[in-house]
Image: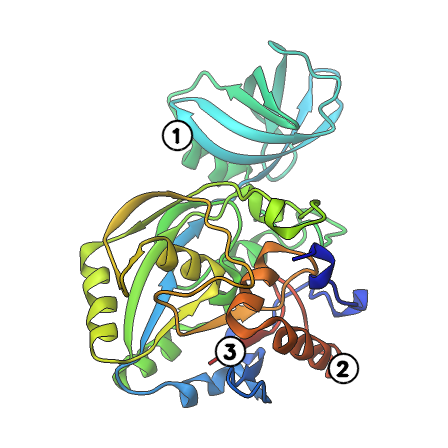
């Protein structure tokens, strides 16, 4: 399949720059998968499409305030993205404007007010734009990022003043059920759910199950290969507990539907699928789901609207069908839906 087959035209003004005033106040485009029929609804209406016995699977990863600012000793400004702490005081990061940095040089990490917070040594470059920083401190990365970190918004969300919406973004670029810290991007389909909505679903005999997949920086990496199958996914860490595996398997055994929230939940479930069941597992997955893939577990999904020619759009097209997906996206553009991370949602059922 050609990557260009996943292209579509999107007016720039439809790229959401801020979340809807309320989480469940987003719009919801519902696709009936067999027919391709579309319905325009509100996300608050989503419970109407669930049946007793369905299982809703959500990714409970928690977004780290991974974006930070730093400076060289000369005063030159740097922008960074924390990826992980590989050992105490050793950070793997991505750095912008770092061409002049030499291995062994000192950089200063700044707090959210632009003041010097802590020194770090640029120990080693490990890939294009990727560095290992060594920080001589007894503090954990979580403690430091709590003072210097911003929400790691994707590059298509623009902020005139990086500090202007700090707390609002830290709150809203996070699901209400986030528990396991480790993601550097949000599982955005889950941003629309409220605690009240999840409680109402459970009261209607919809089971909830949880997976954890820590979204990595690779989620922002564009597909540059001409042929979609030549793209290499970056591995991301995931886990599925025995308790949640039992909930999902019991649902499958009863003939009910597994409805995954977001591409991360879909990829986790399909990574642990075995003969129509899931197995409790902890590991890493680079599963690339694209048209032609045969789903073993997932019956339906909640998703946001994704970038053209992206691996996320490829996954949606694999479930809904390419023609159905592109028709839905054309409809969403015509009806002025809001796109991408802070945008509206879609239910494929």
Percent coordinates x, y for residue 301 in the rendering: 46, 72
Q: Is residue 54 above or below residue 248?
A: below
Q: CA distance from mark 3 to mark 1?
A: 39 Å
Q: Of callouts 3 and 1, which one flags the residue occurring earlier in the amino acid sequence?
A: 1
Is residue 54 left or right of 80 when viewed as pictured?
left
Say which residue appears at 51% left-offset and 66% top-offset. Answer: 189
The residue under label 3 is: 347
Disc 2 crowd, CA 10 A, few/some/many (<14, 14-19, 20+): few
Question: How many other residues sit within 10 Å of disc 1, few (<14), some (14-19) or many (≥20)?
Answer: few
Looking at the image, residue 347 lies above or below residue 239: below
How far apart are labels 2 and 1 at the CA level?
Answer: 48 Å
Kindly identify which residue carries mark 2: 334
Identify the element where label 2 is drawn. helix
Q: Is residue 89 visible?
A: yes
Q: Is residue 60 visible?
A: no
The residue to which callout 1 is attached is 140
Mark 2 against mark 1, which lies toward the viewer? 2
Residue that appears at 50% across and 77% down: 348
Q: CA distance from mark 2 to mark 3?
A: 18 Å
Residue 238 versus residue 262 in the image, above or below? above
Q: Residue at x 67, y 50 (%)?
A: 227
- Residue 3 x %, y %: 69, 55
Q: Please tell me which of labels 2 and 3 falls first in the chain.
A: 2
């Amino acid at each position: 399949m050609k990557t260009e087959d996943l292209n579509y035209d999107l007016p720039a003004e439809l790229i959401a720059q801020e979340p809807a005033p309320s989480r469940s106040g987003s719009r919801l485009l519902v696709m009936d998968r067999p027919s391709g029929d579309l319905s325009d609804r509100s996300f608050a209406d989503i419970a109407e499409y669930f049946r007793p016995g369905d299982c809703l699977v959500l990714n409970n990863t928690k977004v780290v305030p991974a974006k930070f600012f730093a400076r060289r000793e000369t005063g030159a400004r740097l922008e960074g993205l924390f990826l992980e702490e590989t050992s105490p005081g050793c950070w793997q990061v991505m750095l912008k404007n770092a061409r002049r940095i030499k291995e062994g040089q000192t950089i200063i990490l700044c707090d959210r007010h632009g003041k010097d917070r802590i020194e770090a040594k640029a120990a080693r470059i490990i890939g294009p734009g990727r560095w290992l920083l060594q920080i001589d401190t007894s503090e954990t990365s979580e403690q430091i990022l709590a003072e210097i970190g911003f929400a790691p918004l994707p590059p298509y969300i623009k902020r005139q003043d990086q500090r202007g919406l700090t707390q609002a973004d830290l709150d809203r670029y996070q699901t209400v059920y986030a528990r396991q810290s480790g993601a550097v991007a949000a599982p955005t389909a889950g941003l629309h759910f409220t605690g009240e909505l999840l409680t109402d679903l459970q009261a209607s005999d919809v089971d909830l199950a949880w997976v954890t997949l820590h979204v990595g920086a690779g989620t922002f990496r564009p597909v540059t290969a001409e042929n979609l199958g030549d793209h290499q996914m970056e591995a991301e860490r995931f886990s599925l507990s025995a308790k949640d595996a039992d909930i999902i398997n019991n649902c499958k055994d009863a003939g009910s539907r597994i409805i995954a929230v977001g591409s991360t939940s879909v990829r986790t479930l399909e990574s642990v699928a075995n003969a129509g069941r899931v197995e409790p597992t902890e590991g890493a997955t680079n599963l690339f789901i694209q048209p032609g893939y045969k789903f073993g577990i997932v019956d339906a999904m909640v998703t946001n609207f994704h970038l053209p020619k992206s691996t996320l759009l490829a996954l949606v097209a694999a479930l809904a069908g390419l023609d159905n997906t592109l028709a839905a996206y054309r409809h969403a553009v015509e009806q002025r839906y809001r796109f991408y991370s802070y945008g509206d949602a879609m239910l494929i059922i």
